[in-house]
Amino acid sequence: MTSSTPGGTLTLADDLTISRMGYGAMQLTGPGVFGPPKDRDQALAVLREAIGLGVTHIDTSDFYGPVVVNELIKEALHPYPADLHIVTKVGARRSDDGGWIPSLEPADLKAQVHENLQHLGLDLLDVVNLRLGSVEGTSDDSIAAQFGALAQLQEQGLIRHLGLSGVSSAQLTEAQAIAPVVTVQNLYNLANRQDDDLVDRCAAENIAFASFFPLGGFTPLQSDTLTKVAAHLDASPQQVALAWLLQRSATTVLIPGTSSIAHLRENVAAAGLVLPADAVAELDAIGK
C-alpha cells in the first residue's frame, strides 16, 4: 500500500479532486458484464486494493451486472473514504440475456439515478454521466431533454456534478448551455484517435476526459511499435499505453478495469512511467 496518489490529481471543482489514475469497476462481473463474479471475495479485494493504492476515482454503473458492481462497491468500501469519488452513469438497461438496451427517456433516467443511489448506499452521487453513444460512434442528436432531466436532479441535491459519455463536441456544447459539465467519457486510446480535437477542447476547458477502453477494450491493443517501445522502457505494453494517455493531455484521466489484483497494481504503476519525447513521437504515429 502507498499513500501517494497515482498519476497525480485533477481538480475539477472546489469539491471534486480525483486521482488521474482511476479504476473502472465494469469487469467485476461475470462474462459479458453480466451476472455475479466468479470469485466474489476476489472482487471485493480488488476494490479495497485500489483504495489502498491511492485511487480516489472509481467508475461504475447500475447496468454493470446489472446492480452487481454497485453492490460490490458498497460491500467493499462503505462507509466510503472522504476523498473517494464515485462516478456512475445512466442511459441504458440490460435485457434478460445480457443485451444492452438504450434507455434515455427522462423519467427513466431519473429512476436510474435513484437506483444507483440505493445500490451504492448514498444520498448524493458525486458525478453522473449521461451515456449517449457507443463504441460504434457518436451523433449530434439533441440531448436537451435527457441532460435537462439530470440537471433537475442536480438542483434537487441528488447529484453533485454532471458528465457525458459517448458524446460529440456539439452535444457537449448543448449540455453546457443547461448545466456545467465536469467530465467526458469517450472511446479513446493509442489506436483510436478520432476524438483528438475533443481531448484538446476538454483540456482547454478543464473538463476531465476519461478514455474508456484505454487498452483497446474487447480487442486488446496490438502494435509492433508499442511492443518495441515497451521493451526499451522495461515496461509492459499496457503500462506504456496508459502512460501515453496520461501524457496526452493534462486533463486525461484513466479508468482501466480488471478483476485481478496483479493487473490492478500493474496499471497503477503505469502512472509513474514517464515517456521520453522520442517514445511519444513513435507512439503518436500509431493512430495516424
Image (cartoon, rainbow, N blue to C red):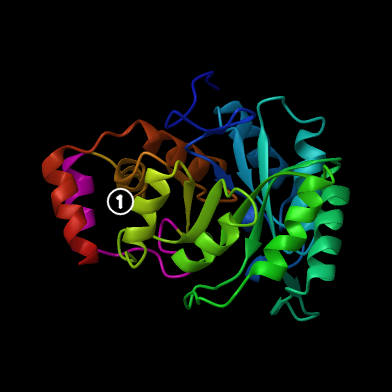
Residue 182 lies left or right of residue 74; in this view the side is left
Residue 133 percent coordinates (x, y): 55, 72
Residue 167 lies left or right of residue 273; in this view the side is right
Of 17 and 266, nearer the camera is 17
Seen at 74% across and 75% down, the residue is: 103
Is residue 10 in sight in this rendering? yes
Is residue 168 in sight in this rendering? no
Q: How many marks?
A: 1
Q: Which residue is mark 1?
A: 237
Residue 100 percent coordinates (x, y): 68, 77
Quadrant location of the N terminus in the rendered image: top right
Task: Label 1, secondary structure: give it.
Answer: helix
Residue 231 percent coordinates (x, y): 20, 46
- Give the amino acid type for the residue marked by disc 1 in the picture: Pro
* Vertical placement of residue 242 versus 110, above or below: above
Residue 12 percent coordinates (x, y): 54, 36
* Vertical placement of residue 242 versus 18, above or below: below
Residue segment shown in magenta:
214-233
Is residue 134 inside the magenta stretch?
Answer: no
Seen at 86% across and 55% down, the residue is: 114
Seen at 46% across and 36% down, the residue is: 268
Residue 96 lies left or right of residue 243; in this view the side is right
Q: Residue furthest front?
A: 177
